[in-house]
Amino acid sequence: MTAVSGAAGVRRAYVVADLGGTTLRIGRIAEGAGSAESVRRVATEGLDRYRELPAQTLQDRVVGQLTRELEDYLGSPEGAEASAVGVSFAGPMTKGGTVLAGPTLWGGAAAPLPIADILTRRLSVPVVVANDLTAAAWRYAAAEPEPFCLITVSSGIGHKVFRNGEVLISDSGHGGEIGHWRVDPREDALPCECGGRGHLGGMVSGRGVLLAARRAAVADPAGFGCSALAGPSAGDPAGITNEALARAVRADDAFATQVLRTCLVPLAQAVNCIFTAIGVRRYLFIGGFAVAVGHRFITLLGDELTRLGCFGLTDREIRGMLALGAADDDHCLIGMARMLARTPLLTAGTGGDA
């Protein structure tokens, strides 16, 4: 998407940031490098920490934090020689760099956020902003010869389809938000952080599965009591954590596994829908919760997807479509650096979902 002009033979460096619902990461990546250096991680000052605050207040708080952290990093020895800044953002946005919503960052409705313009005015280097999954897809673009769908299972659910050298998204920012597909039409369906109900992200994200586990523990105290989850939580359903849940699933704990199986049904339906609609046969899963569960996540999802069936495919072919991405949290940082390096940066304020 962007690159920064430099002297011939000079290896440029970028400061890259990933603003997620739980964590803000900022690091340095040299042009052509496959990993980030000097990465700082801080808790995002948003919905995950301050659920009692209104959406607009949280938006202001998140933007202020992002700006301060980037200014501090650029002023440090690690960021002093940066040619450009790239920011991946957990929310839909236009190609012009205006964020339309931040469900995992500030929850409900807030004003459209021209984040590319805001950062360009505050920072002393060119800035590019993109949706987080758009950025992450570029990490895998060179290694995936066929069209692929990248799905994150973390604070929320998101996806992007990469085909023929581009991420499939509209100029106005529509597409790639399968986490807000309504899969449960009931009025009392689980709430989503965007304010809706019955959305995929509210049911299958790390936060959604955790809520499901706690509800299941209350509904089935005997099953919970026999689970490995009962120990770390001292028998209190409210004490169940994502870390303990992922560990229990990896160990084939019956209670935890059944909770995850149930939650994965609508995700399998989503994969089935994407395959049936546009024929993509490669699905990569990233995000803190999916990576924490590991290959058991792919196995259990494969069980549900083969049960549903994918038109024209054998069970072996269906399972072969699913894979985990790299077991780290630097997808967006690496992807942003690759975006910065691929096209001349013509203006200081460029951003969006291209």
Image (cartoon, rainbow, N blue to C red):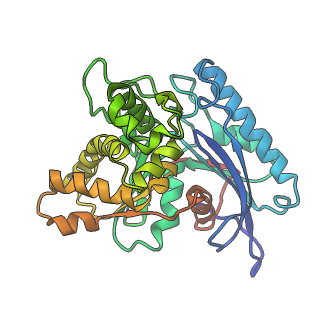
> Which residue lies most toward the bottom here?
9
Residue 62 placement, left or right of 353: right
Residue drawn at (51%, 45%), measured in percent from left and top?
A: 244
Residue 241, above or below 127: above
Residue drawn at (64%, 64%), measured in percent from left and top?
A: 3
Give the quadrant of the N terminus: bottom right
Quadrant of the image occupied by residue 320: bottom left
Q: Nearer the viewer, residue 327 or 65?
A: 327
Q: Can residue 354 be seen by looking at this rendering?
A: no
Q: Nearer the viewer, residue 162 or 166?
A: 162
Residue 229, given in percent of the width and then of the height, sits at 46, 41
Residue 137 placement, left or right of 265: right
Residue 195 placement, left or right of 273: right
Residue 8, given in percent of the width and then of the height, sits at 75, 80
Residue 70, given in percent of the width and then of the height, sits at 77, 47
Residue 39, above or below 201: below
Residue drawn at (30%, 53%), measured in percent from left and top?
A: 301
Residue 5, given in percent of the width and then of the height, sits at 71, 68
Residue drawn at (38%, 35%), measured in percent from left and top?
A: 224
Quadrant of the image occupied by residue 209: top left
Residue 203, above or below 339: above
Q: Nearer the viewer, residue 345 or 278?
A: 278
Q: Can residue 311 be seen by looking at this rendering?
A: yes
